[in-house]
Image (cartoon, rainbow, N blue to C red):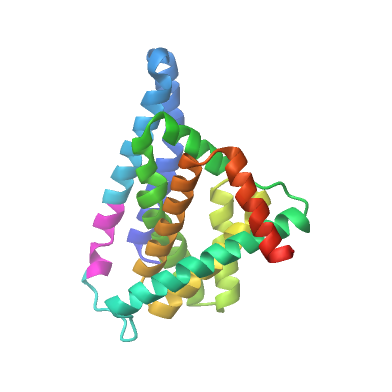
């Protein structure tokens, strides 16, 4: 793996961990503005991480495209197909977790993001845009891509999706992360363009953010019940 890829992974890890010293500083020196400082630091740190990642990827951007890389029209087509495919497997995985594994619906990670977004709406640019770019570069282009050179698709997608779930701190929802990771990896392999899973990932996150932001918990649960009726009867 090229050194620049390790630097990108390190940048992402530092960005995730930087919230802890920021929180301590805010708590000790600016307790009255603790929440705002921590949130704005998250926004700034993720923006910096994106900038650093793009700078480190300049070499990759200058490389000629794979001879089988999809055209712009194919990227758009597979982005639309991928969106509905990813949404379907996400719903299906959620229903399996709930009905077969007995895992309660809902994601604490998503709920935390929405609580923060309601406090400072600007924060929504992270889950909607910045995080999908960083995560697809790291988990699909770098981790999955490196594994796929040595292993088959299934194992490569499974391992990268597992790491993806662990990083998000929601091991109980590993089935959802794995199913999504499979779709994103498939789109990457199918189009030979990392842009495709980035678009789909961003579209899904944006849809979730808008839905969670505009709907009440009761309305969200009602929609989940309707989806359950559709798929399970």
- Near-viewer residue (69 or 153): 69
State the residue lying farthest toward the left: 62
Q: Tell me what residue is drawn at x 72 percent, y 60 percent.
A: 96
Q: Which residues are magenta?
A: 52-61
Residue in the foreground of this view, choosing between 188 and 57: 188
Q: How many marks?
A: 0
Where residue 164 sits, quadrant-wise, is: bottom right
Tell me if residue 67 comes above or below residue 223 in the rendering: below
Write the residue at 36% across / 65% down: 2
Predominant SS of the magenta segment: helix
Q: Is residue 153 magenta?
A: no
Residue lying at the far bottom in this picture: please name it.
67
Q: Quadrant of residue 161?
A: bottom right
Residue at position x 44%, y 60% from top?
A: 201
At 50% across and 67% down in the image, what residue appears?
84
In the rendered image, which quarter is residue 94 located in? bottom right
Task: Give coordinates of residue 23: x percent, y percent.
Answer: 44, 25
Does the image show residue 144? no
In front of the other: 64 or 98: 98
Q: Residue 31: percent from the left, percent from the top?
A: 42, 14
x and y, in percent, of residue 123 in the image: 37, 38
Residue 58 in the image: x percent, y percent?
A: 23, 63
Q: Quadrant of the N terminus?
A: bottom left
Asked whether the viewer can see residue 44, the reply is: yes
């Amino acid at each position: 793996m090229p050194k620049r890829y390790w630097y990108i992974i390190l940048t992402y890890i530092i960005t995730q961990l930087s919230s802890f010293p920021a929180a301590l500083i805010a708590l000790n020196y600016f307790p009255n503005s603790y929440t705002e400082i921590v949130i704005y630091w998250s926004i700034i740190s993720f923006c910096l991480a994106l900038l650093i990642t793009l700078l480190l990827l300049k070499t990759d951007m200058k490389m000629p495209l794979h001879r089988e890389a999809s055209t712009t029209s194919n990227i758009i087509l597979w982005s639309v197909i991928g969106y509905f495919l990813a949404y379907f497997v996400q719903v299906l995985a959620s229903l399996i977790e709930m009905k077969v594994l007995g895992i309660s619906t809902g994601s604490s990670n998503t709920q935390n993001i929405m609580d923060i977004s309601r406090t400072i709406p600007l924060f929504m640019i992270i889950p909607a845009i910045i995080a999908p770019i960083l995560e697809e570069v790291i988990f699909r282009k770098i981790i999955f891509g490196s594994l796929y050179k040595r292993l088959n698709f299934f194992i490569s997608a499974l391992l990268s999706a597992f790491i993806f779930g662990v990083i998000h701190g929601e091991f109980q929802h590993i089935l959802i992360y794995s199913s999504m990771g499979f779709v994103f990896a498939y789109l990457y392999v199918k189009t030979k363009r990392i842009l495709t899973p980035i678009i789909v990932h961003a579209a899904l996150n944006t849809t979730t953010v808008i839905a969670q932001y505009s709907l009440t918990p009761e309305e969200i649960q009602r929609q989940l019940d309707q989806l359950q009726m559709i798929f399970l009867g």
